[in-house]
Amino acid sequence: MNPPRRSLAFPPVNRCRYDAIRSSSARMQRMVIGAAIVSCLATTAAEAQQNRRVFVGAVAGVSTLSADARSAITSDGADVSLYKPENGPALNVFLGVHVREYVTVQANYIWNRNNLALTSVRSTALGPSFYEQPQTSSQHAIVGDLLVYFREQRSVVRPYLSAGVGVVRLETNPDGPARSRNAVPRAEMLRATRATLRVAVGLDLRLGQRWSVRYSFSESVSGNPISAQLSPPGQRNLANFQNLFGVVYAL
């Protein structure tokens, strides 16, 4: 005779204990998510502080102006005119913003000063005539640049190319007596404002979290009021080449 079967009986589930476990698991998930969000925010803030967006700086160096000359030969004689510029000091003060990892916009104030000499020679049947007038020239320019870097902001060495447009104010003044014969030199003061196009190549070398060293070589091209003073007048635009070294400070 077979023994009677016994039904298996399980103890009743503790509903309160199950709810407590679920509640504890939900709190743990919320804590983990909150910790992840705080960590992301802290990392973003640290990166933003490391890659500071706004910066200021100043670079100084040497400015070289382009020369110009003109000759005119007729049946009555020959005329030759030219001006010869000398190298002079240059200064560029700027404020910039890193709008993207590799793209920056920058506002510049640029000043330079150069000595030059205006020369005119004329030969006719009545005899030769000439003059040479020494002058000083200065330029004040406001230019907006777009810089494109080739390496990311955290790099120690960051080469770049830039281009920009602006306005330049040119002033020239006589600098001492003129030498002349049978000719009247141009001795008046000149003031003129022209649009300018500026292109540059450069390099930023990071020294720390805030400081960098910058080198740039730039060329600015504008209309040439100096050539208009020549007799006969010149025809070339005025080019301003600048080799500059300085510092950059991240705000």
Image (cartoon, grey):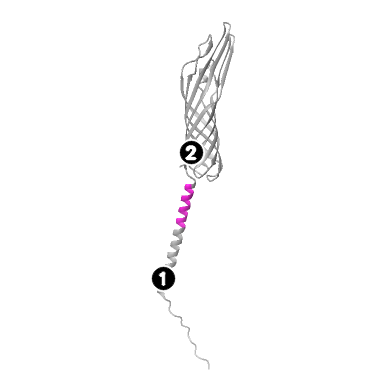
Q: Which residues are magenta?
A: 36-49
Considering every residue shown, the one lying at the far top of the view is 126
Residue 225 visible here: no
Crowdedness near tag 1: few (<14), some (14–19) or many (≥20) residues, C-alpha within 10 Å:
few
Examine the structure image and report whether residue 44 is included in the region drawn in magenta. yes
Residue depicted at x 49% and y 49%: 47
Tag 2 secondary structure: strand
Percent position of residue 212, x then y:
52, 40
Given contact means CB atoms under 8 Å apart, are the residues at marks 1 and 2 in contact? no
Magenta-drawn stretch, dominant element (helix, strand or loop): helix
| Residue 16, placed above or below residue 245 | below
Front position in the image: 59 or 26? 59
Q: Which residue is mark 2?
A: 105
Residue extending furthest toward the left: 16
Residue 170 painted magenta: no
Residue under the image location 47 percent in, 56 percent down: 39
Q: Which residue is mark 1?
A: 20
User: So how many labels did they put on this image?
Assistant: 2
Query: What residue lies at 53% left-to-right and 37% top-to-bottom?
Result: 214
CA gap, disc 1 and disc 2? 58 Å
